[in-house]
Amino acid sequence: MKKTRKAAEDSLRWQWKHNRWAFITWILLRLFVLAAMIYSTVQGDYENVFICLLVLFLFLLPSILQKRLGIAFPSGFQIVILLHIFACEILGEIACYYVRYPHWDTITHTVWGFLCAAIGYSLVDILNQEDATHFHLSPAFLAIVAFCFSMTIGVLWEFFEFAADRLFLMDMQKDTVVTSFSSVMLDPTQSNIPIFVDGITDVAINGESLGLGGYLDIGLFDTMEDLFVNMIGALTFSLIGFFRSRRENARRIAEQFIPQVITKASAPEA
């Protein structure tokens, strides 16, 4: 028991010494989540209580992975991913920012694309540093891997959203109101000719108007926008990674988001 407590105290001291701002961010956000969980419990909203518990667990993941894998996450990476989790789950879901602010989902997907590119870049970069598997990789190759990794994660996430909507009748792929579209389904000759429909002002279901002011697209626009902004985030970090070895500014930015293997000299004592 004493050994476990000492190890935890040593880990906290190491975090405070090496990632002070990340540690402060973790403490502050954790307090906000605990406050939200207490409020949700009082209100009897147990779904939000579950979300808060999930967020508290996700907040611990960087420390768990750092200890298990022997990899140090830089302050910049930790701060951004903590803020991203808080923005998605607490602000986005519990505070309904996804509904209140139409571009909130766009911002979070852009940041996620950036972070996934950093993770993809790191996976190959760390492997390249191992003596047993060391091989020379060009900056362009690392940038391409980072970009492709991020886009793959983005596509898999959209698959997850689609499955949740179809199987559990959720609305993770948010709908969009449009006033025009084209479809070959409306071609009476069945000649694969797209028929353009414009000026849609209302849609009725079973004779009752929806009052939306247009046609309700069920998720396609949201999915494509998510993938597009994910690409922007991925491309941003990929370019930073590409210029990492050539420009000092790019190197400093990249090092704030690229995890490194913990050396014995820098690791917290057990």
Image (tube, grey):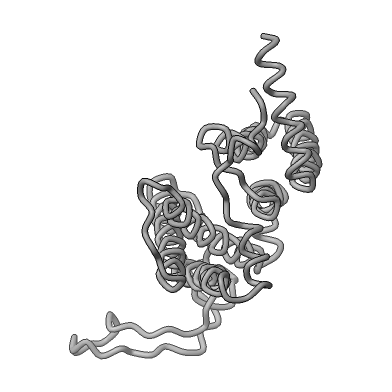
Q: Is residue 44 left or right of residue 146?
A: right
Identify the residue at image location x=70%, y=50%.
75
Q: In this view, does 167 lie to the left or right of 200?
A: left
Q: Where is residue 111 in the image (x, y as percent from the top left)?
A: 61, 62
Q: Position of residue 94 (x, y in %)?
A: 69, 46
Query: Up-down: is 73 above or below 196?
Result: above
Residue 88 shows up from this direction = yes
Identify the residue at image location x=80%, y=37%.
31
Foreground residue among 217 and 137: 137
Q: Position of residue 151 (x, y in %)?
A: 43, 65
Q: In this view, does 29 lie to the left or right of 232?
A: right
Foreground residue among 54 and 135: 135
Q: In which quarter of the image is residue 98?
A: bottom right
Query: Up-down: is 200 above or below 70?
Result: below
- Indicate the quadrant containing the N terminus: top left, top right, bottom left or bottom right: top right
Identify the residue at image location x=53%, y=63%.
113
- Indicate the quadrant containing the C terminus: top left, top right, bottom left or bottom right: top right
Query: Up-down: is 191 above or below 208?
Result: below
